[in-house]
């Protein structure tokens, strides 16, 4: 399957977003993985860094659902164009788009970086400027 690694990532992210289970994402990572995004100057390294990064992602939003418009896999790189909608803990609606680049080392993620407008996301988190999310309320398992 041409997009097998991209789909494995999407499935693991869905597990995090729907059930709060960070371990499927961590299991995809190499021991020396590097994870970052534009909202933080920090680069999260190793499996504990990955666990922290993805736990913080989920903790930022009460509800979140990502959809993917384009999944591109070429060699050891995957590009994912996505939109995420949800609700912040203060009830504010959140909707933002971006692109994530994943570099693989065989079956494991060596590097992950997400590009999006962190300023716009911050405004949505604090002021609820996005259209109201249609993500259904769920209770943690």
Image (cartoon, grey):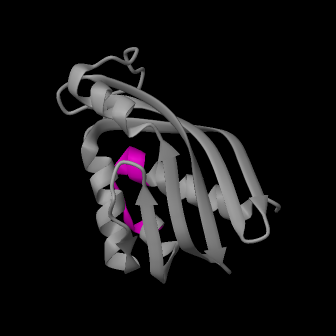
The quarter of the picture where the N terminus appears is bottom right
| Residues shaded magenta | 16-24
Q: In terms of image quadrants, where is residue 67?
A: top right
Q: Along the horizontal axis of the image, is 32 left or right of 68?
A: left
Q: In terms of image quadrants, where is residue 123?
A: top left
Picture residue at 27% right of the left edge, 30% below the top: 125
Above-or-below relation of 77 to 13: below
Residue 2 in the image, given as x and y percentages of width and height:
82, 61
Above-or-below relation of 22 to 17: below
Q: Is residue 141 visible?
A: no
Residue 5 in the image, given as x and y percentages of width and height:
68, 64
Above-or-below relation of 4 to 33: above
**Is 28 one of the magenta-colored residues?**
no
Q: Give the dominant element type of the magenta stretch: helix, strand or loop.
A: helix
Residue 90 in the image, given as x and y percentages of width and height:
17, 27
Picture residue at 33% right of the left edge, 54% below the top: 40
**Is 23 one of the magenta-colored residues?**
yes
Q: Nearer the viewer, residue 113 or 94?
A: 113
Q: Residue furthest left?
A: 90
Picture residue at 29% right of the left edge, 65% below the top: 52
Picture residue at 39% right of the left edge, 21% below the top: 133
Residue 28 in the image, given as x and y percentages of width and height:
52, 72
Q: Along the horizontal axis of the image, is 13 left or right of 54?
A: right
Q: Is residue 122 visible?
A: yes
Q: Along the horizontal axis of the image, is 136 left or right of 59?
A: right
Q: Nearer the viewer, residue 41 or 132?
A: 41
């Amino acid at each position: 399957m041409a997009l097998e690694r991209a789909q494995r990532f999407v499935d693991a992210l869905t597990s995090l977003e729907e059930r709060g289970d960070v371990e499927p994402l961590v299991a995809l990572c190499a021991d020396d993985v590097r994870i970052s995004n534009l909202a933080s100057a920090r680069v999260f390294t190793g499996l504990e860094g990955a666990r922290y990064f993805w736990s913080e992602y989920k903790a930022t939003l009460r509800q979140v659902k990502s959809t993917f418009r384009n999944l591109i896999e070429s060699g050891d790189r995957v590009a994912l164009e996505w939109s995420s909608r949800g609700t912040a803990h203060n009830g504010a609606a959140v909707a933002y788009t971006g692109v994530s680049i994943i570099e693989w080392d065989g079956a494991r993620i060596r590097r992950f970086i997400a590009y999006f407008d962190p300023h716009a996301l911050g405004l949505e988190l604090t002021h609820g400027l996005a259209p109201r999310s249609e993500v259904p309320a769920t209770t943690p398992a």
